[in-house]
Image (cartoon, rainbow, N blue to C red):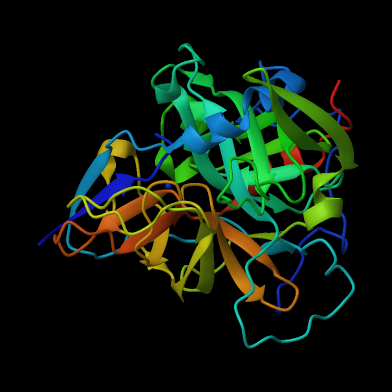
Amino acid sequence: MFSRARRIAIPLAGLVAIGLAAGTISGASASATAPSDVVSKNATTPAEQAIQFWTPDRIKLATDHNDGLELSTKGVKGSNDTPDGPPGSVPPIGAEKTKTKKSKHVNLPNTVGRVFFTLPKADPRNPKNWRYCSASSVQSKYRNLVATSAHCVYDTKKNTFYDNWIFIPSYWDGDKVWNGKAPYGIYAAKTFNAHDDFVVKEDYDFDYAFVNVYNGIKVGWEKVDGRWKWTVKNVGRLGDNVGGQGFTWNRSTKLNVFSFGYPAGEHPDGDRPYTGRTMKFCYGKTKPMPEARKYNLQEHIGFKCSFTAGASGGPFLYNYKSASRTGYLVGVNSVAWDTDGNDRYDHISSPYFNTDTYKVYKAAANRWTGNMP
């Protein structure tokens, strides 16, 4: 039996801190030069223009990005993912010096939301170019960082980052055109941070990215004479409003994790079980996934989950606590797999987070943004 995987793109306690003081990000200052294998580039779309672009009707029409990438690997035997250094972690915002209570229910994290963007070098007025992914706020020095998949920030076909990129945490799709979709505000991208091996080599073992966002704004929309008018209010830093997940790397490949996201796409057989209107979750134990040489995919971990397109970029959270709605980011939704050949996705996978991942994270976690210009 052959397994098939598809990129679900808008193209899918006891942690020990190593070299990190509780609640802080060690390393270089925000103005320091990032390592040579970290690609950091400012967004080309002005922040206010990006937010103003996403009017209520455009957000409603944005589609999950799925460009039909398929991978085939014989069987489900995993590759040999191993740490390339000692394990490390950064605690979630608010959990630096506190203990959380247990909860019997799975409370959805406020940190997770949807990112919206337009395809580059294409007409932004064409609805075919309006796309979305999933993402999560993560701990950082200036509380301004979003974690997602690299394919949710960078177009490997046109070799450039996406345009009009914004993040809406705790997004939900109300029955009316603009009803409760952005309870904590909207955050526009300032700086994209990804690994050179994804940007240059299209290596999906590096399909992760960290985006520094400006302070958020709440938008009031009103349609006047057929055109949208807006009023705005500054709501401050992302991490102050929704918190931020912790970050961990070089962990075991076999961990119990939650994955969160906004799946909406169809399975290979055409069935469409999700709508993307609300956040969904999966829970399971990760394992190494098969190698897929065509896309340089050799070090992914995954678990049983039927997520489809739209969930890309959502977090794998280890040691997730429902009471605090926080855990440790140990992966991001990258590839959906059909491992039994029945044309239904049954596994979701993420690149294995190692020291290379930490390099990108650390470079991004020390960047300051502030208010939109």
Number of labels in the image equals 0
For image coordinates 47% across by 11% down, the residue present is: 123
Residue with the most extreme front position: 225
Q: Position of residue 307 (x, y in %)?
A: 38, 58
For image coordinates 69% across by 62% down, the residue present is: 88
Visible residue check, residue 42: no
Nearer-the-camera pick, 176 or 9: 176
For image coordinates 74% across by 37% down, the residue present is: 187
Nearer-the-camera pick, 128 or 79: 128
Q: Quadrant of the C terminus?
A: top right
* Left or right of 106, for residue 338: left
Q: Position of residue 266 (x, y in %)?
A: 29, 49
For image coordinates 54% across by 59% down, the residue present is: 279
Q: From what the image shows, is residue 259 above or below residue 36?
A: below
Q: Position of residue 48 (x, y in %)?
A: 76, 22
Q: Position of residue 27 (x, y in %)?
A: 83, 44
- Tell me where residue 93 sits by quadrant: bottom right
Visible residue check, residue 100: yes
Q: Quadrant of the N terminus?
A: bottom left
* Left or right of 262, for residue 1: left
Nearer-the-camera pick, 158 or 202: 158
